[in-house]
Image (tube, rainbow, N blue to C red):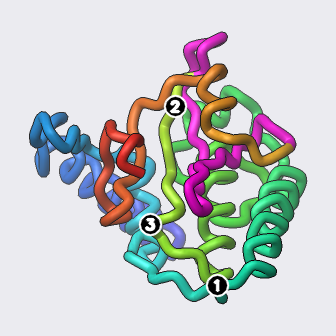
Amino acid sequence: MTERISMIRHALRMLATIYCICSQPAYSSYESQAVAPPLSFSLFCIQYPEDCQHHDDRRIRDFRSSIQRWRELAQINSTVNFGIAPKNPLASRRDAEWQILPSEGNCGDYAVTKRHLLLRSGWPSSALRLAEVVIRTTGEHHLVLLVREGRAIFVLDNLRPVVTPLADALEGYIVLRAESGTDPELWTREIAAF
Protein backbone atom coordinates (compact mmCIF):
# COMPACT_ATOMS: atom_id res chain seq x y z
CA MET A 1 0.00 0.00 0.00
CA THR A 2 2.81 2.44 0.90
CA GLU A 3 4.56 1.64 -2.37
CA ARG A 4 1.36 2.35 -4.29
CA ILE A 5 0.90 5.73 -2.59
CA SER A 6 4.50 6.57 -3.38
CA MET A 7 3.94 5.71 -7.05
CA ILE A 8 0.80 7.87 -7.17
CA ARG A 9 2.65 10.81 -5.59
CA HIS A 10 5.47 10.41 -8.09
CA ALA A 11 2.99 10.37 -10.98
CA LEU A 12 1.27 13.51 -9.63
CA ARG A 13 4.62 15.27 -9.34
CA MET A 14 5.45 14.35 -12.93
CA LEU A 15 2.07 15.63 -14.15
CA ALA A 16 2.55 18.89 -12.26
CA THR A 17 6.02 19.28 -13.76
CA ILE A 18 4.71 18.67 -17.25
CA TYR A 19 1.90 21.16 -16.62
CA CYS A 20 4.32 23.85 -15.45
CA ILE A 21 6.73 23.35 -18.30
CA CYS A 22 4.34 22.77 -21.19
CA SER A 23 1.09 24.54 -20.41
CA GLN A 24 2.17 28.13 -20.74
CA PRO A 25 5.12 30.24 -21.77
CA ALA A 26 7.08 32.16 -19.15
CA TYR A 27 5.27 35.33 -20.31
CA SER A 28 1.90 34.76 -21.95
CA SER A 29 1.51 38.47 -22.72
CA TYR A 30 3.51 41.59 -22.05
CA GLU A 31 0.56 43.53 -20.62
CA SER A 32 -0.49 41.06 -17.94
CA GLN A 33 2.97 39.66 -17.21
CA ALA A 34 1.39 36.21 -16.60
CA VAL A 35 3.96 33.62 -15.54
CA ALA A 36 3.99 29.93 -14.72
CA PRO A 37 3.37 29.22 -11.03
CA PRO A 38 6.09 27.59 -8.92
CA LEU A 39 6.18 23.80 -9.21
CA SER A 40 5.53 23.54 -5.47
CA PHE A 41 2.30 25.51 -5.96
CA SER A 42 1.12 23.11 -8.68
CA LEU A 43 1.84 20.15 -6.40
CA PHE A 44 0.05 21.93 -3.55
CA CYS A 45 -3.07 22.43 -5.72
CA ILE A 46 -3.16 18.72 -6.51
CA GLN A 47 -3.08 17.87 -2.80
CA TYR A 48 -5.30 20.77 -1.58
CA PRO A 49 -7.61 21.69 -4.51
CA GLU A 50 -10.05 23.59 -2.27
CA ASP A 51 -7.31 26.07 -1.31
CA CYS A 52 -6.61 26.84 -4.98
CA GLN A 53 -10.18 27.80 -5.86
CA HIS A 54 -11.82 31.23 -5.87
CA HIS A 55 -13.47 32.11 -2.53
CA ASP A 56 -15.82 35.04 -2.04
CA ASP A 57 -15.67 37.40 0.93
CA ARG A 58 -17.70 35.99 3.84
CA ARG A 59 -16.69 38.57 6.46
CA ILE A 60 -19.05 41.06 8.13
CA ARG A 61 -18.30 44.60 6.95
CA ASP A 62 -18.57 47.24 9.66
CA PHE A 63 -16.17 49.52 11.56
CA ARG A 64 -15.76 47.13 14.45
CA SER A 65 -15.00 44.16 12.18
CA SER A 66 -12.13 46.12 10.58
CA ILE A 67 -10.36 46.11 13.94
CA GLN A 68 -11.22 42.44 14.36
CA ARG A 69 -9.75 41.65 10.93
CA TRP A 70 -6.46 43.36 11.85
CA ARG A 71 -6.33 41.34 15.07
CA GLU A 72 -7.11 38.19 13.12
CA LEU A 73 -4.19 38.85 10.74
CA ALA A 74 -1.80 39.43 13.63
CA GLN A 75 -3.09 36.40 15.54
CA ILE A 76 -2.85 34.00 12.61
CA ASN A 77 0.61 35.28 11.64
CA SER A 78 1.89 34.84 15.18
CA THR A 79 0.20 31.48 15.80
CA VAL A 80 1.55 29.94 12.59
CA ASN A 81 5.04 31.43 13.04
CA PHE A 82 5.31 29.90 16.51
CA GLY A 83 3.28 26.74 15.77
CA ILE A 84 5.47 25.37 12.97
CA ALA A 85 9.09 24.53 13.76
CA PRO A 86 11.53 25.62 11.02
CA LYS A 87 12.97 22.78 8.96
CA ASN A 88 16.68 22.25 8.66
CA PRO A 89 17.78 24.48 5.72
CA LEU A 90 19.24 21.56 3.75
CA ALA A 91 16.08 19.47 4.16
CA SER A 92 13.97 22.51 3.34
CA ARG A 93 15.74 23.07 -0.01
CA ARG A 94 14.99 19.50 -1.08
CA ASP A 95 11.33 19.69 -0.01
CA ALA A 96 9.10 20.76 -2.90
CA GLU A 97 5.79 19.91 -1.21
CA TRP A 98 3.94 22.59 0.76
CA GLN A 99 1.81 21.28 3.61
CA ILE A 100 -0.97 22.87 5.66
CA LEU A 101 -0.35 22.76 9.42
CA PRO A 102 2.80 20.58 9.48
CA SER A 103 4.74 20.21 12.73
CA GLU A 104 7.86 21.50 10.96
CA GLY A 105 8.19 23.23 7.63
CA ASN A 106 9.73 25.73 5.27
CA CYS A 107 8.53 29.18 4.17
CA GLY A 108 6.00 27.63 1.77
CA ASP A 109 4.37 25.66 4.58
CA TYR A 110 4.06 28.81 6.72
CA ALA A 111 2.55 30.87 3.86
CA VAL A 112 -0.03 28.30 2.70
CA THR A 113 -1.06 27.58 6.30
CA LYS A 114 -1.70 31.29 6.94
CA ARG A 115 -3.65 31.58 3.68
CA HIS A 116 -5.66 28.45 4.52
CA LEU A 117 -6.62 29.76 7.96
CA LEU A 118 -7.61 33.17 6.58
CA LEU A 119 -9.74 31.54 3.84
CA ARG A 120 -11.49 29.47 6.52
CA SER A 121 -12.11 32.69 8.48
CA GLY A 122 -14.01 34.14 5.54
CA TRP A 123 -11.35 36.20 3.76
CA PRO A 124 -11.74 36.28 -0.03
CA SER A 125 -9.09 34.61 -2.14
CA SER A 126 -8.66 37.90 -4.05
CA ALA A 127 -7.25 39.49 -0.87
CA LEU A 128 -4.80 36.64 -0.16
CA ARG A 129 -1.90 36.18 -2.57
CA LEU A 130 1.10 33.92 -2.20
CA ALA A 131 4.23 35.68 -3.46
CA GLU A 132 7.67 34.38 -4.33
CA VAL A 133 10.35 36.87 -3.33
CA VAL A 134 14.13 37.03 -3.28
CA ILE A 135 15.73 38.11 -0.02
CA ARG A 136 18.03 41.01 -0.94
CA THR A 137 20.79 40.19 1.56
CA THR A 138 21.15 36.50 0.70
CA GLY A 139 19.63 36.06 -2.77
CA GLU A 140 17.53 33.21 -1.37
CA HIS A 141 14.07 32.53 -2.83
CA HIS A 142 11.35 32.80 -0.20
CA LEU A 143 7.53 32.55 -0.06
CA VAL A 144 5.32 35.05 1.79
CA LEU A 145 1.62 35.85 1.95
CA LEU A 146 0.42 39.25 0.73
CA VAL A 147 -2.88 40.39 2.24
CA ARG A 148 -4.98 43.32 1.03
CA GLU A 149 -7.02 45.01 3.73
CA GLY A 150 -8.78 48.09 2.39
CA ARG A 151 -6.18 50.08 0.47
CA ALA A 152 -3.23 48.62 2.38
CA ILE A 153 -1.18 45.55 1.46
CA PHE A 154 0.49 43.65 4.28
CA VAL A 155 3.09 40.89 4.32
CA LEU A 156 2.79 37.84 6.54
CA ASP A 157 6.23 36.25 6.70
CA ASN A 158 7.69 33.53 8.90
CA LEU A 159 10.95 35.53 9.10
CA ARG A 160 9.17 38.54 10.68
CA PRO A 161 7.37 38.36 14.01
CA VAL A 162 4.76 40.99 13.06
CA VAL A 163 2.54 41.78 10.08
CA THR A 164 4.46 44.31 7.95
CA PRO A 165 3.25 46.85 5.37
CA LEU A 166 4.40 45.86 1.88
CA ALA A 167 6.28 49.16 1.39
CA ASP A 168 8.45 48.38 4.44
CA ALA A 169 8.97 44.74 3.45
CA LEU A 170 10.19 45.70 -0.04
CA GLU A 171 13.36 47.06 1.56
CA GLY A 172 14.21 43.43 2.36
CA TYR A 173 13.04 41.64 -0.75
CA ILE A 174 12.28 41.74 -4.45
CA VAL A 175 8.93 40.30 -5.55
CA LEU A 176 9.39 37.82 -8.44
CA ARG A 177 5.84 36.61 -8.93
CA ALA A 178 2.55 36.37 -7.07
CA GLU A 179 -0.86 34.81 -7.40
CA SER A 180 -3.32 36.73 -9.52
CA GLY A 181 -6.02 38.58 -7.62
CA THR A 182 -8.68 37.33 -10.03
CA ASP A 183 -7.78 33.63 -10.24
CA PRO A 184 -5.83 31.90 -7.43
CA GLU A 185 -4.33 29.39 -9.88
CA LEU A 186 -2.77 32.07 -12.10
CA TRP A 187 0.47 33.84 -11.25
CA THR A 188 1.75 37.20 -12.43
CA ARG A 189 4.74 39.52 -12.14
CA GLU A 190 2.37 42.43 -11.52
CA ILE A 191 1.69 43.20 -7.86
CA ALA A 192 0.70 46.81 -8.50
CA ALA A 193 -2.75 45.69 -9.69
CA PHE A 194 -3.29 43.85 -6.42
Residue 96: percent from the left, percent from the top?
A: 50, 44
Q: In the figure, residue 188 lies in which quadrant?
A: top left
Residue picked out by circle 2: 133
Give how far apart the Cα atoms at labels 1 and 3 are: 16 Å
Residue 104: percent from the left, percent from the top?
A: 78, 51
Q: In the figure, residue 177 lies in which quadrant?
A: top left
Between 31 and 135, the one lying in front of the other is 31
Name the secondary structure under disc 3.
Answer: helix
Residue picked out by circle 3: 126
Query: Magenta span covers which residues?
Result: 135-161
Between 6 and 78, the one lying in front of the other is 78
Give how far apart the Cα atoms at labels 1 and 2 are: 31 Å
Give how far apart the Cα atoms at labels 3 and 2 are: 19 Å
Q: Which label lies toward us, 3 or 2?
A: 3
Q: Residue at x 81, y 75 (%)?
A: 68
Q: Residue at x 82, y 59 (%)?
A: 74
The crowd level at tag 1 (other Cα within 10 Å; few <14, some 14-19, many 20+) is few
Q: Which label lies toward us, 1 or 3?
A: 1
Amino acid carrying label 3: it is Ser
Residue 84: percent from the left, percent from the top?
A: 81, 54
Q: Residue at x 51, y 75 (%)?
A: 124
Work out whether 118 lies above or below 38.
below
- Name the side, left or right, on which 190 lies relative to 153: left
Queried whether the magenta region covers residue 91, the answer comes back as no
CB of mark 3 within 8 Å of CB of mark 2? no
- Name the side, left or right, on which 5 lies relative to 160: left
Residue picked out by circle 1: 61
